[in-house]
Image: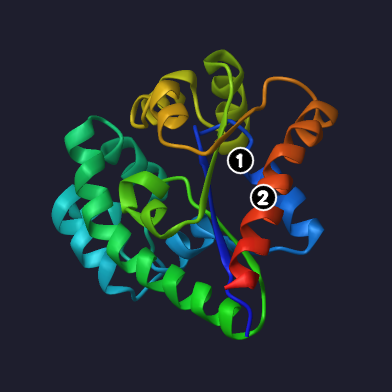
Amino acid sequence: MIKAIAIGLTGQTGSGKSTVGEMLSKIGYYIIDCDKIAKLVTEKGSPVLNELALAFGNDVVSGDGELNRKLLAKRAFANKEATSTLNNITHPVITRHVNKKVNGAFFNGYDVVVIDAPALFESGIDKSCDIVVSVVADENIRLQRIMKRDNIDADSAQLRIKAQYDEEYYKSHSDIIIKNDSDLKALKEQLSELLNLIEVKRNEENKQ
């Protein structure tokens, strides 16, 4: 059985982190999408919804039991205290799901697992990663991407930007920084450093 190398992939909202994840997926690495897990644990019937309703108001959960994600985002990203409350409710559940998936990949013989997690640092998942990669981009570029991606106005997009750490935090807490201000070609070129580091780590683990 091969020891899996865990890569934490994170970055600023609107930086294009998911695009990097897709590139790594095409290489053949096992990708764990924490956004999808977050949606899974907040689906209708989840006990997490009761906690969110208590913290952010009963109207964040509709009469038919569905989460109003836009309303929750508006309230949860209004200030750092509210964001912290959201994280305290959702992160432990998400982390348990992530750990199960990592162990499953390990058992099935994958030697590289990529944990695509917007809140990698906030959740503490970064501590169990062998390599931490952060994707960053200019704020104006990210603002436009977020507005288009989530179909929201500039003020709502700014709330999401301000709810995260600044670029310097990502730089000081990561092994590799990928700057995604340009085109796909430039992004691919930056992956070479990461791929080289993955090979080094994988060879080190396989010698043990």
In this rendered view, identify the residue nearer to me: 12 or 104.
104
Q: Please give left or right for residue 55 compared with residue 152 in the image.
A: left
Give the residue type that dot 1 points to.
Lys
- The answer to whether residue 178 is above or below residue 9 is above
Which residue of the protein is positioned furthest toward the left in this rendering?
54
- The answer to whether residue 177 is above or below residue 69 is above
Image coordinates of residue 203 in percent, x first then y, are 68, 63
User: To which residue does mark 1 refer?
Assistant: 17
Image coordinates of residue 90 in percent, x first then y, are 30, 59
Q: In which quarter of the image is residue 206?
A: bottom right
Q: Please give left or right for residue 199 compared with residue 52 in the image.
A: right
At horizontal 34% and vertical 76% (from top left) the residue drawn is 45
- The residues bearing labels 1 and 2 have C-alpha atoms spaced at a distance of 6 Å
User: To which residue does mark 2 refer?
Assistant: 21
Image coordinates of residue 4 in percent, x first then y, are 58, 70
What label does residue 158 carry, if any?
Answer: none
Q: Please give left or right for residue 113 compared with residue 183 in the image.
A: left
Estimate how packed mark 2 is, as few (under 14), some (14 to 19) or many (20 or more) residues with alpha carbons within 10 Å: many
Q: Can residue 12 be seen in this view?
A: yes
Which residue of the protein is positioned furthest toward the right in this rendering?
185
At horizontal 58% and vertical 85% (from top left) the residue drawn is 107
Q: How many labels does the image show?
A: 2
Look at the image and tell me in which quarter the C terminus lies. Answer: bottom right
Give the residue type that dot 2 points to.
Gly
Estimate how packed mark 1 is, as few (under 14), some (14 to 19) or many (20 or more) residues with alpha carbons within 10 Å: many
